[in-house]
Amino acid sequence: MELELRYFAMIREAVGERTTTREFDSGTTVRDVLAALENDHPDLEGTLLADDGTIARSVTVLRNGINVTHLGRGATELADGDTLSITPPVTGG
């Protein structure tokens, strides 16, 4: 299945692109995608997933505009054509 991945701030810097399209196997979860990104981009290692495999508190992941914390969190299964937006926390004042 094909997913569109959108990156923001320091995650975009680590990946080197604003948006990518990637192929994943059917049944892929949000956790699987984040693990693949950490594996492919060493600068992200430990940034997207916590040691226990859950989504890191410092990261917001939206599936088609809906925060995955309102779905199945990291276990949320993805479907062909889904868009994941991956954002670090926004701070400032």
Image (cartoon, rainbow, N blue to C red):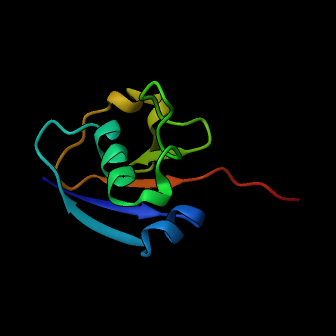
Q: Residue furthest front?
A: 42
| Quarter of the figure with residue 71 | top left
Q: Residue furthest bottom?
A: 17
Total residue callouts: 0
Residue 70: give x, y in percent of width and height.
Answer: 47, 29
Residue 17: give x, y in percent of width and height.
Answer: 42, 75
Q: Residue at x 43, y 58 (%)?
A: 42
Q: Quadrant of the C terminus?
A: bottom right
Q: Residue at x 70, y 54 (%)?
A: 90
Q: Is residue 5 left or right of residue 11?
A: left
Q: Is residue 36 left or right of residue 27?
A: right
In this picture, is 3 found above or below 32? Answer: below
Q: Residue furthest right?
A: 93
Q: Residue at x 19, y 44 (%)?
A: 79
| Quarter of the figure with residue 78 | top left
Q: Residue at x 62, y 42 (%)?
A: 58
In this picture, is 5 found above or below 66? Answer: below
Q: Is residue 57 left or right of residue 1?
A: right
In this picture, is 72 found above or below 4? Answer: above
Residue 75: give x, y in percent of width and height.
Answer: 32, 28
- Which one is in front, 4 or 16? 16
Residue 88: give x, y in percent of width and height.
Answer: 60, 52
Q: Is residue 93 left or right of residue 59?
A: right
